[in-house]
Amino acid sequence: MKRRTGRMLSLALSAGMALGCGAVPAMAESTEASGDYDLTLYSIQTTDPEFKDWLSDVESGTGLKINVIAAPTDSDTRQQKVTTMLSTGDSSVDIIEINDEMSTTFKNSGWLEGLNDTVMTDDVRDKFAKGYVDQMITNVDGQVIGVPSYTGYLAFWVNQQIMDEVGIKSIDTKDDFMKYMEAVSGNGRFGYGGSWEKTYVFNEIAQFVNMFGGDYYDWTNPHNKEAMEFLHELVQKGYTSLDQLPDKYEQMNPKAIDGKYGCWFMWGTGTDYANADMLGDDKIHMAMVPSFAEDGSRSIFTDSWSYVLNAASEHKDAAVKFLQYMTGKDGMEASYKYFDRYPARADLAEEIVPDSNPVKKMYAEYAKECNVQGRPMLPQTMEFISAMGTIFQSYMRDEISIDDFLSQAQGYVEEYQ
Amino acid sequence: MYRSKSKAMALLPWLLVLPVVILRAFTTIYPVTKTIRDSFFDIRLLAGKNVFCGFENYIRMFHDPKVLISIQFTVIFVFVSMFFHITLGVLLAMALNMKFKGQRFLRTIVLIPWAMPSVVAGMAAKWAFNNDYGLINDLIRRIVPSFQYNWLIYRGSARAAVIAVDLWKDLPFFAILVLSNLQFISGDLYEAAKVDGASARQCFTKITLPLIAKGVATLCIPFTLWRLTSFDLVYSMTSGGPGEDTALIAYRITTEAFTNLNIGYASAMAVVLFLIMMAFSLINMRITGSKKFET
């Protein structure tokens, strides 16, 4: 009897360990003591040293007392936490900062409040990049579900010291790019560097497909094949390294700073490079995206993190007030001043960002010369991204052929579309 | 009178554990039954789907290459890791059982990796195995200066790296528990054996091993179950990569449940894992309860 009871208890313990997925995970811990707050913000910026100053500005600008919960810095964990909060109707958070992956996933779920009548009214909406708003943060009912907090590009970065060393002045075409690859690569240095972890590499796959004039949703397109074979060739010739397969940005950036890469694609305005004293015209800087397509066109992706309103929120009036502030000059100026975030509204960027900022000039050139697009995403975003990343890694490691890669990629597009 | 008193006494333990049983019913039986129920439904939160699908999730699971790779690696992970837990754990325990200067200090510091949270260990390991900045290759390059290898980009080496970190982290704890078994063996037995002319090897095989066998076998139950449900190390170290090569089944379940929001499919996988664990526990308990282990 005792043994049987012991067995039952052991089995129950095993079950508890094995079957965690029925339980509702605990809410993230607040960074501040609980008190009388007007709203709760789930923010990705809390690790920024100037976060408190930003918060103080926003609180005095809105008249709201804001409780802040720190979002995890790891992208997978963050997405899981936000997903859990929204899908369970958790009302303890009112405003959440989400990226394009999450907005694509959640915008049609009903978990986010539509903002057309309160925040993103016609006159306000028109001041943001129309393509981005329509493509990334508008749901099937035509409701805009977020307020973009900045404008970012997947910019092309070069190391000027390396360019000077090999005597190449610009990388404008595919031929220039290949000459640069050949000149730079060798002795532990690579012409091109990337972040090829399976959930990160999606950015570069899509970027190269666009540069070759392909279509990410159609893997029968010959330009897609050309783009993938091109990346494979970079690996085969030693112009880029398979070592970057597990790398996220936190692994890629130190390598870029240490001069291991000649060029790469990266989001943001180069804060990591500036912190390492490697940002500047004579060091690491943004450059125009080279043109690989037959028609000479250039392509670039834009992204943003958006503030969204949790549909389960019990403080919607305060949340709307916060969001309205974020669409205006004061909100955008605070983000630029404290976080270096380039204003999402072009009219305000002109006012807020000084002409001396090189990012302003480069972003203006990107906007003028490139075909600017939101990244190609499908509703089951992370599943799709991860699946594509997995087969990309397999192809780069020669585990599958290009034809296998293309047919599997097309299969995933059809499965997740 | 005596009989009714003894009946009441027999009920007393059950009364005392009742609060815990109720708590367990809520925290364990409810999630288990809910998970079993969900495994027969196609629940995809993002698609707004929640329909009965019978055994479809179970059938799909055994045709899904991602799940098959996860099962394959989980089997490898559990067997290889447990093999080294037992062999190296016993050796380490014996080393810690020897009398030498600094023994107490060594016994204390040997537990440091175990005290470290798995996520922290995983993140540190990701850097440690990096070809450019990693501690492992740096150490190897002191002997072979031209050594270049990125452990986390090939299936075999990435899997080996995950198993190595798991061993680095949990082996000391296993060894300390084996050590506690060793300390129950009376020194008289060894002395008597020596008087009878037994060699060191004979002492080990005829005295030490038989006397710690039951303890080691008992330890294998929780340690194997922990390996089967291991998730955090892979999550923070490789994210299941390269490709899906290091995605343990618990990691796959978590990804399906909380990233992809395919609750029904994840539940089906969890049920299968539950059954495997149950079967494994029963086999283990049968083995440890057998007469072979009676001392």
Image: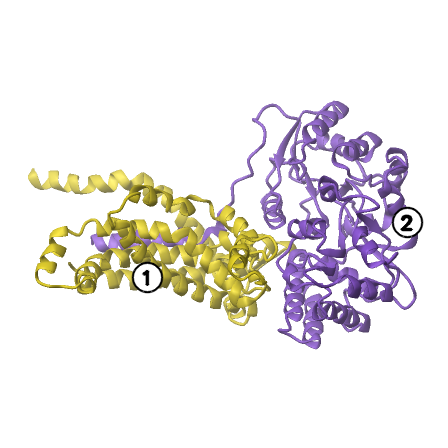
User: Regarding mark 2 in the picture, which secondary structure is present there?
Assistant: helix
Q: In the image, is B169 to the left or to the right of A32?
A: left
Closer to the camera, A400 or A348?
A400
Q: Position of residue A32 (x, y in %)?
A: 58, 28
User: Regarding mark 1 in the picture, which secondary structure is present there?
Assistant: helix
Chain B painted colour: yellow
Q: Residues within 10 Å of mark 1 (few under 14, many from 20)?
A: few
Q: Can the viewer see residue B241?
A: no
Residue located beneath label 2 in the image: A365
What is the CA distance from the residue labelled 1 to the residue labelled 2? 64 Å
Q: In the image, is A9 to the left or to the right of B60?
A: left
Residue visible at 57% across and 52% down?
Answer: B127
Q: Residues within 10 Å of mark 2 (few under 14, many from 20)?
A: few
Residue located beneath label 1 in the image: B87
Q: Position of residue A119 (x, y in %)?
A: 80, 36
Identify the chain drawn in purple.
A
